[in-house]
Every structure is written in structure tokens, then in C-alpha cells.
Image (cartoon, rainbow, N blue to C red):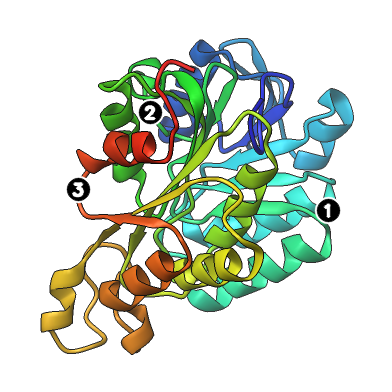
Amino acid sequence: MSILVDSSTRVLIQGITGTQGRRHSEYSIDYGTNIVAGVTPGKAGQDVRGVPVFDTVADAVAETGAEATVLYVPAAAVPGAVEDAVAAGIKLIVGTSEGISRQQAAYFRALTEAKSARLVGFNTTGVLSAGEAKLGGIGGGVSDFLYPRGRIGVCSRSGGLTGEIGLAMKQDGYGISTALAMGGDWITGTPMVEYVRLFEQDPDTDAIILFGETGTDNELEVAEHLAANGMKKPVIALLAGRFQENYPPGISFGHAAAMIGNDKQTISAKAKALSDAGAAVIATLEEVPWRLRDFGVRPGA
């Protein structure tokens, strides 16, 4: 099982004929993802590795029944791409584009929520359900190497750290149910706590690993959820960026959202809130398998 996507998910790619869209679509096809359509205005009738290209999302959905989309379009084209996907009834949108403003991000979240759709990103490498499907560039051409199949769910604010966590677990015999990079922007289409809830409901996910940073309230919302509802499954939080507490607030390190806005958004504050709620807070990748064992989650499942 998995969250968000599986082998039956019918996927379309907006911007499939561009360099990045084509490359990552081919990686996804090789992985076994059920890509049924691509969309590039003016390119209808072409194909990418046998995947038909349409001029509009509406045409693609009507012809193929696509239910999820990955966006490989420049920032200026994102509003139209999101609106087209929502209007066509797409229920899962994975936004890889960078340079999305907070105002736009807030609008995209409101728009998708109003239509009961889910937005992953923006500024995400994507979502991968091990052995089933991958949407986005997550894992590149070595997804099997980084994300062996297993029973651990991963949600990360960093695309790169998503892969590092997968590799750290693999070396100790653990595997992935679903791994996703939620995006490095201040406002994302889906907050971290929503992914935690999805993993809690997934019968084939035994534990949840989070990668968090300074800035935003994502980790604090997870702590509030765990404190209010109890920890249904083990939660391990790898937190990075404590050094930023030595600098004045408002300085971004790395991702646009890795910026302390107030005292509650420091790593010290987030670590305390999560620990008080029952999560295991760690500072290094090597601790991941140790903490899984501490919770009684064994490798090889």
C-alpha cells in the first residue's frame, strides 16, 4: 500500500516535451509509473516514449482519464497550469517549479482545497511509492537504489535529504512505503501534518520519518497533532539548522523557508515541542535505524 499514488494512478505530465519534463517522465516510465498523457500547447499529436501529447489538460483527461499531474513548467506558466488541472478534475497536483511567490502559493492551496484536490509542492522533487510509481524527479534514474520497498513513510522539507534518509534506512535493512518531498517554500500546497495523518491511516506504514528545518510552523503543527491525538505510529524527526539561532532572525539559509520568523520557529523550540509530544528527535542520519529499533520497528518487513 502507499499514500497519494500507486501503480494504478493515471498520470499526466504538463510540460512533457520540455527538457526536464521529458527526462523525468522517462525515468518515471522506466520505474513503472502509469503515465497516460502529456500536455504541451501546440504539440498535440506528438508522443514521448509512446505517451500521447495533447494541447490541453481538458483534452488529455477526457481521452485518458488522467487523475494526477506533474508540472514541469516555468513559474510564469504555473497559475494557468494549476487552474487548468483543477478545472479538468485532477485530484493530485505535483508542482516542481521554483520561484513561486507566497501570494501565489496561498492562492494555489486555497484553490486546490476548494476543489478537494491535493497539491504537493511547489519546489518539490516529488512523491514515490516504492515499487509502485513516482511522480517528479525524486530518485532520478536510481530510485530503486535509494528507495527499496518497505514499511516506513518519509516526509521531508528537502528533496536531497529525502534520498539521504532512504539510503540511511536501506543500509540497515529498512525500506520505504512512500517518500515525498513536500517542498522548500514558506507556503506549500499541503502542510506536513496532513502527510502525517495520511501515513497514520496507511495500514502498510509502520513508522514515520520527518525531515524538518528552521522556519514555518510545519513541525509545530505536527507536535500539536501528536499532543492532541496521541502518537498512533512512531515518529522520528531529523531536524537541521540549529546553528541559525546564532544569527539574526530573517536570514534564509538554503531553502526559501529555512528562515527563523519568530522564537517558535527555531530548531530548539521545534525539538522540544516534538519531544514533549512523544516523537524521537535526532540530529544525524545514523540515528534513524537506531530509533526505529528503539520503537520496536524491525528491518526486513
Give left or right: position of 129 versus 108. left
Depth check: give the residue in front, 5 or 211.
Answer: 211
Within-10-Å neighbours for mark 2: few <14, some 14–19, many 20+: many
Badge 2 element: loop
Q: Which mark is residue 31?
A: none
Give left or right: position of 77 versus 63. left
Q: Are marks 2 and 3 in contact (CB under 8 Å)?
A: no
Real-space CA distance between mark 2 and mark 3, rounded to the nearest whole angstrom: 21 Å
User: Relative to 280, is 170 above or below?
Assistant: above
Pick whichever of labels 1 and 3 is earlier in the sequence. Answer: 1
Residue bearing the label numbered 2 = 139
Residue at screen point 49% across, 59% down: 75
Q: Are marks 2 and 1 in contact (CB under 8 Å)?
A: no
Q: Which mark is residue 284?
A: 3
Q: Residue furthest right?
A: 62
Residue at screen point 65% across, 53% down: 197
Q: In the picture, which quadrant includes the N terminus?
A: top right
Relative image position of residue 287 (x, y in whole percent): 23, 42
Q: Nearer the viewer, mark 2 or mark 3?
A: 3
- Residue 81 visible from this viewpoint: no
The amino acid marked with disc number 3 is Thr
- Residue 92 visible from this viewpoint: yes
Quarter-of-image position of residue 275: bottom left
Relative image position of residue 228 (x, y in whole percent): 63, 71
Residue bearing the label numbered 1 = 87
